[in-house]
Amino acid sequence: MRYRRLGNSGLHVSVFGLGTNAFGKRADKAASVRIIHHALDRGVNFIDTANIYANTESERIIGEALAGRRHEVVLATKAGLPMGPGDNDRGSSRFHLMRELENSLSRLKTDYVDLYQIHTFDPNTPLEETLRALDDMVRSGKVRYIGASNYAAWELMKALGISDRQGYVRYVSTQTSYSLADRTPEQELVPVCLDQGVGIIPYFPLAGGILSGKYGSADAVPAGSRADKDPGFRRFLGDRTIALGQQVSKLAAELGYTAGVLSLAWLMDRPAVSTVIVGATRVEQLEDNLRSVEISLQPEVAQELDAISEPFRYGKPFAVYRLS
C-alpha cells in the first residue's frame, strides 16, 4: 500500500480509501464487515462514511467491524445533509453539528473521529459559526482534523480565510466528484487546493461504475449493478459518459488491466489528490480495484487518458450534493 499526507497535515492516509455508502444497503452487514477487514489486512487505513449513509446503518456496521482494530484506521465521517424533516435536521449550524457528532460517535463506537467533514456548503449558516463549532470539536478531542465536501472553490477559499483570520483550525481536505468522467475540479478547485495545501478526496472515482465499462447503453443495465439496484442512479447514464467508459475499457484491455483499475490509477496520480474513495459490495471487487495501487502508468498511457477525457473538464460536474 502507498500512503500520502492528507493535504499539508501530518496525517498519512492510504492512497486507496474505502468508501462505505453501500454498507447496509447494497452490501449487507456480513459482506460489509468482510470488506472492511480485508481492506485493513491489505493496508487500507482510510475509511470514509457519513451519518446519512444507509439511514445511519453504514456507521453502525463500521463501529462493530472495527472492534479491536480502531487504532488501525483513519476514520472519517460527515454531517450536514438532511437527517430529518425539521429545519434543524440539516446544515452546518452549531446546533446541528454538535448533535450529529455525538450521534456518529455513538454509532461508530468510538470517542473520536479522525476527520470530520461538512457534507456540503450551508448557505443559511455563517461560515464563522460552522468553523468555530469545528474548532471547538477539535479542542475537545472528539475530532482530530476537519474537512469540507461539495464546496465550490470560492466557498473553500472563504472558509480558509476565515480560519486564518480567526485562528481556527483549517480544513485539511475537501471531497468532490472527480474522475475521468468529471474533470471539472481542475478548473478552479485543484488550483486552490494546491495553493492552500488542502488534500483532495475524490468520490465517484469510477463515475458510479460507468468507468468500469459495464454499461453498454442507458437501457442495457446489468443485473446487480448500481443502476439496477438503485434506479435513481440511471440519471447519470449519459451517452457521452458511457462512450468514455467503453474507450477506457478498450485501452485497459490492451494493457492487461480492467477499466476500473486503469481509471483509479490515473486519478491517484492527479495533483493534490491525497486518497481516492473506492466503494465495494464484494471482497472480490475490492481486491480487483486494489491493483490500482500497484501499477505505475507510463507517460504515454496517462497522456492518452488525458486526451480522451479532455471534454469532461468542462460543463457540469458529474455529481454534486447541495442543500436546497
Image (spheres, rainbow, N blue to C red):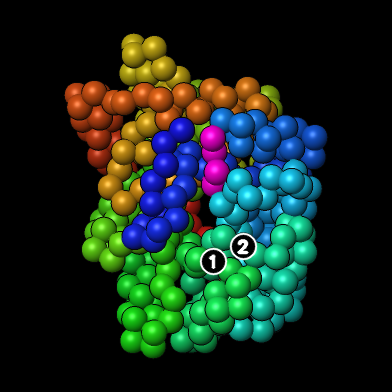
Residue at 54 percent of width and 66 percent of height: 144
Residue at 63 percent of width and 22 percent of height: 284
Residue 262 position in % (x across, y down): 39, 26
Horizontal side, residue 267 vs residue 144: left or right: left
Which is more N-terminal, label 1 or label 2? 2
Q: Quadrant of residue 51?
A: bottom right
Which residue, given by chain and number where applicable, does mark 1 sit on?
Answer: 144
Which residue, given by chain and number where applicable, does mark 2 sit on?
Answer: 113
Q: Nearer the viewer, residue 293 or 186?
A: 293
The part of the chain drawn in magenta is 43-48
Crowding at label 1, few (<14), some or many (≥20) Cα neighbours within 10 Å?
some
Task: Tell me, yes or no, if residue 100 can be seen here.
Answer: yes
Residue at 61 percent of width and 78 percent of height: 140
Residues at circles 2 and 1 in contact by the CB criterion of under 8 Å: yes
Figure disc tally:
2
In the image, what residue type sits under mark 1?
Arg
Crowding at label 2, few (<14), some or many (≥20) Cα neighbours within 10 Å?
many
* Above or below 222: residue 312: below
Q: Quadrant of residue 180?
A: top left
Quarter containing the C terminus: bottom right
In the image, what residue type sits under mark 2?
Val
Q: Secondary structure at mark 1?
A: strand
Horizontal side, residue 178 vs residue 141: left or right: left
